[in-house]
Amino acid sequence: MRLSNLADYAVVAMCAAARHCGGGRTSAAALAAETGLPVPTVQKLVSKLSAAGLLRSTRGSGGGLQLARPAASISVADIVEAVEGPIALTACADGGECNVDALCSVRPHWPMINEALRGTLAGIPLTQLAGQPATPKPPPAIAAQPDPIRALTRASQ
Amino acid sequence: MRLSNLADYAVVAMCAAARHCGGGRTSAAALAAETGLPVPTVQKLVSKLSAAGLLRSTRGSGGGLQLARPAASISVADIVEAVEGPIALTACADGGECNVDALCSVRPHWPMINEALRGTLAGIPLTQLAGQPATPKPPPAIAAQPDPIRALTRASQ
DNA sequence: CTCAAATCGGACTAAATCGTTCCGATTGAG
DNA sequence: CTCAATCGGAACGATTTAGTCCGATTTGAG
């Protein structure tokens, strides 16, 4: 129930990148200097975030990186999924082998919980974390998922 | 964003214990046989769950263990917290030292996210996972937390 | 067109945590 | 009082994870 430090750092780095977004492109080294994280770690994060389509990287001299989408449409769930893979509390949801195939009565309920948590994180955009004053929308954006569990309960059963 | 296998097993074991609850007391070995988990692992889980006050253990010959509270009032959040400690996505929420004290602009927002996730898990009682037909309440119990993020947003700021 | 600088991308090493297993302490029954 | 069965805690091994390094690629200037 604790996300890896990489994912934590990824959120911080993306938050810093969102602040630089208006100024154009930034470099991994600049993000490291701004956040205080080790430079190689930020490079690793940038790799994964770019592969996930959250950052757009421009190579070559004078290159850099910038947000692929507006900060308002990037949620914490997107960042976590980019770094840690799909949000799934249990291993049986991914590849999936319980030692207790038929006996496990809770396994069919895990997808519901996973989706509920993902919905919670998906309702938190980058703008809310960065404290960006440009786009005011904390309350309405969150209200989009009022009852994630209710919806999933009906969907899974 | 993935809980440890111990916590996963704990949920399965508690679910099995909830099924045995009506029949009285059970033993750790019986739970292991029923769930297919290794016996020592279940013993370790029982230790932590008892320390957390979720299970009541009776020592000695003929002893055993039973639920300390009715299954309806035990949530997934309780079990996860018993095994993994407090639900906190980031390390800075627990003991807490970021390498970036003042620079980290997202740190004040983590408690909000943590509480939102905890609220989501707290809304799922054991009865819903066990498929217990005795107490019908899946939909209403979940509706108790309609907008956990909204409430926390106002509380933290 | 060639050179050089700066960047991203992937692979390796070390550390910490997690999972498993074993042994001892405690308690109730015979 | 003796015995047996159980929980409780501690140590070992394995896996995943965080951190570091070096190489490949690309673009701007000369």
Image (spheres, coloured by chain):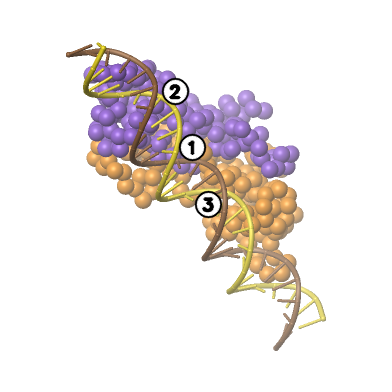
Chain colours: A orange, B purple, C brown, D yellow
Please report, as a chain letter, where disc 3 is located.
A
Look at the image and tell me whether residue B87 can be seen: yes
Tell me how far mark 2 sits from mark 3, CA to CA. 34 Å
Circle nearer the viewer, 2 or 1:
2
Which quadrant of the view contains residue B57? top left
Look at the image and tell me whether residue B142 can be seen: no
Residue A155, compared with residue A19, is above or below; it is above
Secondary structure category for the residue under label 1? loop
Disc 2 crowd rating (10 Å Cα; few below 14, some 14-19, many 20+) is some
Residue sitting nearer the eye, A48 or B86? B86
Tell me how far mark 3 sits from mark 1, CA to CA. 17 Å
Question: Which residue bears the numbered disc 1?
Answer: A1
Residue A11, compared with residue B70, is above or below; it is below
Question: Which residue bears the numbered disc 3?
Answer: A82
Circle nearer the viewer, 2 or 3:
2
Residue sitting nearer the eye, A149 or C26? C26
Q: Amino acid at mark 1?
A: Met
Residue A145 as seen in the image, left or right of residue A35:
left
Residue sitting nearer the eye, B100 or C2? B100
Q: Which residue is drawn at the image coordinates 42% and 27% (left, top)?
A: B48
Tell me how far mark 2 sits from mark 1, CA to CA. 17 Å
Is the residue at mark 2 from the same chain as the one at mark 1? no
Q: Which residue is drawn at the image coordinates 37% and 21% (left, top)?
A: B55
The reply to whether discs 2 and 1 touch (Cβ–Cβ < 8 Å) is: no
Q: Which residue is drawn at the image coordinates 53% and 52% (left, top)?
A: A82
Disc 3 crowd rating (10 Å Cα; few below 14, some 14-19, many 20+) is many
Question: Which residue bears the numbered disc 2?
Answer: B52
